[in-house]
Amino acid sequence: MQEQNSVKSRETLFDAEEMVLNMGPQHPSTHGVLRVLLKLDGETVTDLDCDIGYLHRGVEKIAEHDTYAMITPYWDRLDYVAAVSGDLCYVGGVEKLLQVEVPRRAQYLRVILTELQRIASHLLWLGTHAIDIGAVTVLLYCFREREEILKIFEDFIGARLTAHAFRIGGLWWDIYPEFEERVRDFLDILPDRIEEYEVLLNANRIWLSRTVGIGVLSSEEAINLSLTGPVLRGSGVRYDVRKAQPYSSYEEFEFEVPIGENGDTYDRYLVRMEEMKQSALIIEQALDGLPEGPVMAKVPKVIKPPAGEVYFPIEAPKGELGVYLVSDGSNKPYRMRIRPPAYINLQSLKRMAIGHLVADVVALIGTIDIVLGEVDR
Amino acid sequence: MPDEIKDTPEDQSGDKPSEESKGAGEQGSRGAGEPRERGAEEQGQIISASAEHGSPTDDAPVEEAAAPPPAEDKPAAAAEATSEEKPDAPAKDAAKPAPPRAPDARKPPPPRAAAPPGDRPAKPPPAKKGPVVTVEITDDPFIDRIKERFTGAITEAVATHGQQILVVKKDAYVDLCRFLRDDEEYPFDMCSDLTALHWPDRKGQEFDIVVNLYSVSKNRRLRIKTAIADGEACASVTSIWAGADWMEREVYDMFGMRFEGHPDLRRVLLPQDWPGHPLRKEYPIGYQDNEWTDKHLDYREVDYDTSLIDVKYAERR
């Protein structure tokens, strides 16, 4: 009797210490339908589990039943804040399988559009990341600039978000006459605007205390966790697919790959801010050297790549977005595997969050920069 | 690529006017149709702009096509000549791509219908392309070293589209992975991607595990493939690359093979009690699991005769 009581009391003692908190799937700071189960000791996270798949649509399965051209729009809906980047990955993979050389003008236009998209994606990330941590102003500023990019896209493609710009072999349309002028106008204002954000955040005491030293990842750890994109570069690894395995004539542009030093949330923030500036530089170079000529290669109407397989990675705003295509010679892919950067980067949340406070988990989800459309596919 | 370009000269010699008129018509109509709101004088600009770069579209391939050895043109021309003699039979073949063009209701159809046959005989080359794309790796000291180290275990070492693939027997799979990560010359320290392929017809080797490796310091990629049978477990590489964790979980979720040594092998995208594994080839695409949805989502067949909507409308009336 005595013994039982003591055991019981000890259990309650321990149970009271640990608590499981269910964050999401409808939590505003989880950036979509991400559910995170947190095991807490007081306010400190001791264990964490991500429950994903709420947005699973089975794109890889659908792809096995669609022709190559029909699959492209699905890629807009994976990372829906960077639709053009998804398109580039897929069409690039199919073009490699078909061994089609894309006209240089199309390659340059693709670079311009994907870099604009990168800026738009990073702006959205910055705004939402900041509002998660408590800086509301930045969100409004970021959306102001993002709107300009979306308008440029809208006039070019007709869609603001799911901008389906690329086709297998090039671009469907050439740019409209005012396109260049409008992009240049945007690039003129962008540096000042980025400076505005930096004035708001860089030395902001609240921002610093919420980001410096939070979610530190060493470079070895980051590589071992298969992280890519700004999350990897924040840890000091200079890996960028645009430099490492250039595609779409990225080798012709001069730009820096910024890296962080400490691998914390603040460094990842700095990396992304610098990336926006570098993207602007790339766009400027691409506009200056925009070649004349066609925007579409000669591609057969019925796309039947020869049997074979190819892995084609690109540097999407979130990291290395890859497609692994296996063709059996028919007009539908035998298998299409999407290598989703956000999904693989999200693995690091557990590693980063343990030992931090609940409030930091919000900052960490923001710093990984996930889009659930891509995580769940 | 050479094939497509090689085709163009005959294509254009055969029905150049139709090709051009079609291209110009399309671009013109697009230019005029799309920016309708932008004002009339700009429309002119747009059309002229599209016409300007329209001509390089047609010229460039011709120039390029002139470059390839003329010897190759002859068989293709001969093929076209033969196809010209029997335009009806291949036209049926071409009937499939043709319909989308037919609604254009322009004159071209007859010559266009004759042109695809010209393309058709040239189609076989893609099949010829296959073997050229994939070549045995013979001149790579690193691959040779691996082959030597894992004698007998590496069944295939090929490069396809310039990407190196090693096919390894499943017993040596984990050893090879560990070896590659710890290699001093080319440390493959990142498991870029891990996925699987299902080949239901390959008895005893129904699944391929495909691992895309990347060496950050040496900027080199390598793909490892290993075949396992249906129902067989595969060794996990999570102890080698922590990043493989969710990738293996996803493969388990989608294909159903187990990974031995995985610390937390659960479904990751689908609900834990989901029946079946969707990316298997036998899993149908139009499949709805009513049992599962009944249980979890409280799904009911809607009886439209007595549905609430009708009742509400009836009340309003």
Image (tube, coloured by chain):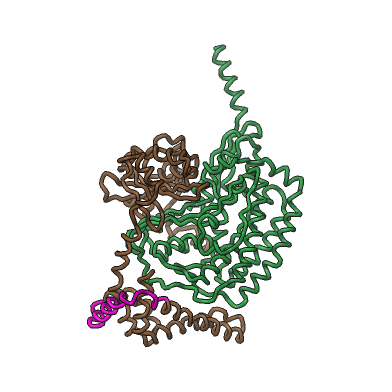
Chain colours: A green, B brown
Q: Is residue B84 magenta?
A: yes
Q: Where is residue A356 shown, x and y percent of the image?
A: 64, 37
Q: Residue at x 51, y 80 (%)?
A: B53
Res. B315 in view: no
Q: Residue furthest top?
A: A2
Count of picture labels: 0
Drawn side of residue A275 relative to residue A102, left or right: right
The secondary structure that dominates the magenta segment is: helix
> What is the quadrant of residue B81 in the picture?
bottom left
> A321 or A374, which lies in front?
A321
Q: Where is residue A18 shown, x and y percent of the image?
A: 60, 30
Q: Where is residue A132 shown, x and y percent of the image?
A: 67, 49
The magenta span reads B64-91
> B192 or A173, which lies in front?
B192
Q: Is residue B77 magenta?
A: yes
> What is the quadrant of residue A328 in the picture?
bottom left
> A73 or A337, which lies in front?
A337
Q: Where is residue B38 shown, x and y percent of the image?
A: 61, 81
> B52 or B66, which lies in front?
B66
Drawn side of residue A20 relative to residue B286, left or right: right
Res. B83 in view: yes
Up/down of A217 relative to A375, above or below = above
Viewport quadrant of the N terminus of chain A: top right
Q: Residue at x 52, y 53 (%)?
A: A320
